[in-house]
Amino acid sequence: MATTVGWLLDQRALDLRSCTGSLGLDRPIDCALTSELVDAADWLSGGELLLTTGMRLPDDRDGRTRYLASLAEAGVAAIGFGTGLGYDTVPDDLVEIGADLGLPVLEVPLPVPFSAIARTLLDRVADDRYAQFTRAARSQPAMTRAVIAGGVPALAGELAAALDHTVVVIDRDGRVVCSRPRAADPVAMTHVRRALGPDHWRSRAASATGVTITDDHTITVQRISSGGAVVGHLAVIGDRPLGDLQRVLVGHASSLITLQHNGAGDVAAERAQLHADVLGFAIRGDTLPATAETMLLRAADDDGLVRVVVFEFRSSTVAADAVGQLASALEQRWRPVFCARDGREVVVLLRGDDDTTTAQSLAAGLRMRAGLGDPVALCDIAASTGQARQAARAAVDGEVVDLVTTRSVLAIDGVQDGLRGLHDIRLRPLLEVRAAGGADLVTTLRRYLEANGHWESAAAAIGVHRHTLRQRVSRIEGLLGVDLADARTRAELLLILLSGDRPPAGRESR
């Protein structure tokens, strides 16, 4: 509903004519002013329709050029030249100069009062203002419903539609949480990060809202704070500045995002339990109702894909404590929390475009090993979980493994099946010792093999003296009837261990 030069010319009651043809018909007009001053530009701010009868128009072409050039530089939308008083027609040289400057020149015939043009524009601005208020009144509850139903990505989508701009939510580490309705222009994002600076993510010293204007973009960035700390930013990218009501919507969205980030304690706890139950259904491969799929879709990337990361901890107690940190790390990154614990294992749902770096950052400071499954559709979460478990078994302490990315033979289904079939048969004597409460010779063997037979490294990893390790290795060789000095035997046993060893919950195995 823009008020432009073209729109004004379409108002037949005004009987206006463009002397410069189709030049500048799309230029916006925000008001009409009357002035006969030659230096009128000094009192203008841009966007005006300047109405004049040419009473003090310079007589020479150079003077008229300076006059129109000053108006063009001030950002005047167009000139409305009244005829029938001082001039019977709009001077030809004035039209030529206006065309050269890109400034539309309109003829206002004598019967049309300047006040009629001003009232027409005022009515139009009032109608536009009312339409904006109506849209804002509809958008605010729609945004509230969106954040409840679909979280921050849904809210960003609703705000983008209301503003007709691109909306980007950025977490406290500078990573893009979501971009709606499409990925932000890389050049615009460069300006966003440059405007914020390296320390802006952690400091509240800078202004809560900033505007950057480039040749192609107008970028508004709203800081999102919680508990005295900066937790993210909301960036709005478009080809024009935001109006007053649009800025109100941005502020409303920022408040909703803050509330979503904080969450009431009881509500957040109940939501986390609900999410854990829904993820549990998906991990088991159960058929999910539509409402559950909608919930899980919040964790997906823009292609609707998710992937599973399985974290293994040394005991179920440690795993239970780790769930809180993993959940907090997800929340800090504006991610929905889908965590499910089973004994010493914690399953977390990530976006399909996440990688080992993301998984590693979630578990920063935790002693664990982890594996990533393939990016999959919601219906294949169970398959991704199985792959993640396999990858976790191939990991060492502190490592996150993606078998497909690393091109490991353990990612081949046939290899996995064959090795799992050998696990309980080949390692039965060691498993029986562990089941009877004896030494965990399975973990001892794995540590020894992962250390490539280096006694000092393996003993340190297990936490025993190297002489104790030598005794255990000798016992293992006797129970299995093997010679661990043989490279082929070591390789075979390590592959079998990686394929299926999952010590019982509560035992110190790592």
Image (cartoon, helix red, strand yellow):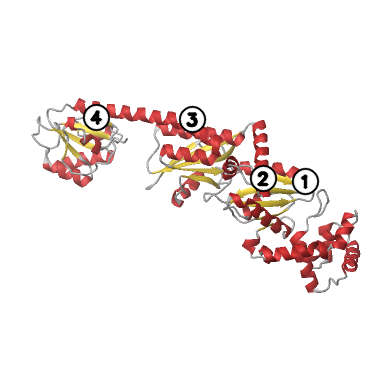
The residue identified by callout 1 is 318
Q: CA distance from mark 4 to mark 1?
A: 73 Å
**Residue depicted at x 62% and y 44%:** 288
Q: CA distance from mark 1 to mark 2?
A: 24 Å
* SS class, disc 4: strand
The residue identified by callout 3 is 141
- Whether residue 210 appears in this view of the structure is no
Q: Measured from the top left, where is residue 214 in percent x and y?
A: 39, 46
Q: Earlier in the sequence, mark 4 or mark 1?
A: 4
The residue identified by callout 2 is 281
Q: CA distance from mark 3 to mark 1?
A: 43 Å
**Residue depicted at x 65% and y 35%:** 268
Q: Earlier in the sequence, mark 1 or mark 2?
A: 2
Q: CA distance from mark 4 to mark 2?
A: 68 Å
* Corner quadrant of residue 477: bottom right
Q: Earlier in the sequence, mark 4 or mark 2?
A: 4
What's the residue type where badge 1 is placed? Val
What's the residue type where badge 4 is placed? Leu
Q: Measured from the top left, where is residue 138 in percent x and y?
A: 44, 30
Q: Nearer the viewer, mark 3 or mark 1?
A: 3
What's the residue type where badge 3 is placed? Pro
What's the residue type where badge 2 is placed? Phe
The residue identified by callout 4 is 33
Say above or below: 405 vs 124.
Answer: below
Q: Residues within 10 Å of mark 4 (few under 14, many from 20)?
A: some
Mark 4 touches mark 3? (CB < 8 Å): no
Mark 4 touches mark 2? (CB < 8 Å): no
